[in-house]
Amino acid sequence: MKRRTMLAGAAAFIAAGCSKIAGTGPGERLLAAAESWNEATHKALRGDALAPEYSKADISPDFRGNGTREIDEPAYKAQLANGFPDWELTITGLVEEPMALKMENIRKLPQRTQITRHDCVEGWSAIGEWTGPQLGLLLEAAQLKPEAKYIVFHCADTLGGSKYYESIDLDDAFHPQTIIAHMLNGEPIPEKNGAPLRLRVERQLGYKHAKYLTGIEAVASLDDIGEGKGGYWEDRYDYQWYAGI
């Protein structure tokens, strides 16, 4: 795969809206067919196209927080106060080399900085400058097993009584603009925006951009993740799993 070949040298450095259809058999099949069509159509039209990038002059004066804005747990607050010295991002699942990366490791990796627009399913947008290593770099270093098809993101925040989680496929995981961001507008990501780490998957809507990341897991199927639809909002409110924009 070309994109993985391009990442191999760097890896060595490490060593859409809510669709609601009645819960009948035919209704569920129609929803699944429509979602598959949406995903296939987006990918056929875009290929490996980049999301638009902007200039510093376009950056929004305030990048609002959404969903979880604060984690009211003593352990998290202590990490936040000290710059997250012991925060770990694990890479597990269908990989040959499981990893646990501290923030100092993540900051030392090759970084990508991009100024992009965040589009929320609620109708608002904001432009921000994000910095972090490409997700593909981390996955290449972890050496995905051939049966891996999806990447699941585990988070520290609890929303509605459940830990937040999301997932994407390998096409988006290895896209050059998909990064694990630790900086927003040249500063460490604020708590309201997902400190210390959040996913930026720039070709999808905001609910796919998981915040407060603690783990990345490679899996062959989404059937055993949550209720099987691949994400927090997908499982609870029938949001589309592929939220392309």
Image (spheres, grey):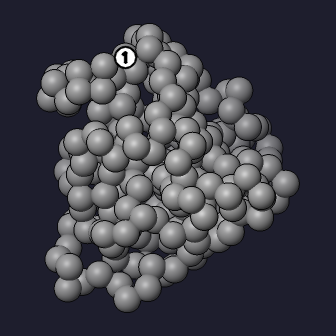
Asked whether the viewer can see residue 91, the reply is: yes
Question: Where 104 falls versus 146 (above or below)?
Answer: below
Question: Where 210 falls versus 169 (above or below)?
Answer: below
Quadrant into which the N terminus falls: top left
70 vs 42, left or right, is right
Q: In which quarter of the image is residue 15?
A: top left
Residue at horizontal 48 percent and vertical 24 percent from the top: 99
Q: Where is residue 89 in the image (x, y as percent from the top left)?
A: 52, 38
Residue at horizontal 63 percent and vertical 47 percent from the top: 155
The tally of labels here is 1
Q: Position of residue 219 (x, y in %)?
A: 55, 23
177 vs 167, left or right, is left
Residue furthest out toward the bottom: 61
Q: Position of residue 107 (x, y in %)?
A: 34, 47
Question: Where 224 falls versus 122 (above or below)?
Answer: above
State the residue in front, 219 or 48. Answer: 219
Q: At label 1, which amino acid type do we have?
A: Gln
18 vs 183, left or right, is right
Question: Where 13 falls versus 52 (above or below)?
Answer: above
Q: What element carries label 1?
A: loop
Q: Position of residue 128 (x, y in %)?
A: 34, 73
Asked whether the viewer can see residue 239, the reply is: no
Quadrant into which the C terminus falls: bottom left
Q: Find disc 1 in the rendering and name its residue.
A: 143
Residue at horizontal 40 percent and vertical 48 percent from the top: 180
State the residue in front, 44 or 155. Answer: 155
State the residue in front, 189 or 6. Answer: 189
Circle 1 Cα neighbour tier, 10 Å, few/some/many (<14 / 14–19 / ≥20): some
Residue at horizontal 37 percent and vertical 27 percent from the top: 139
Q: In which quarter of the image is residue 79?
A: bottom right
Residue furthest out toward the right: 161
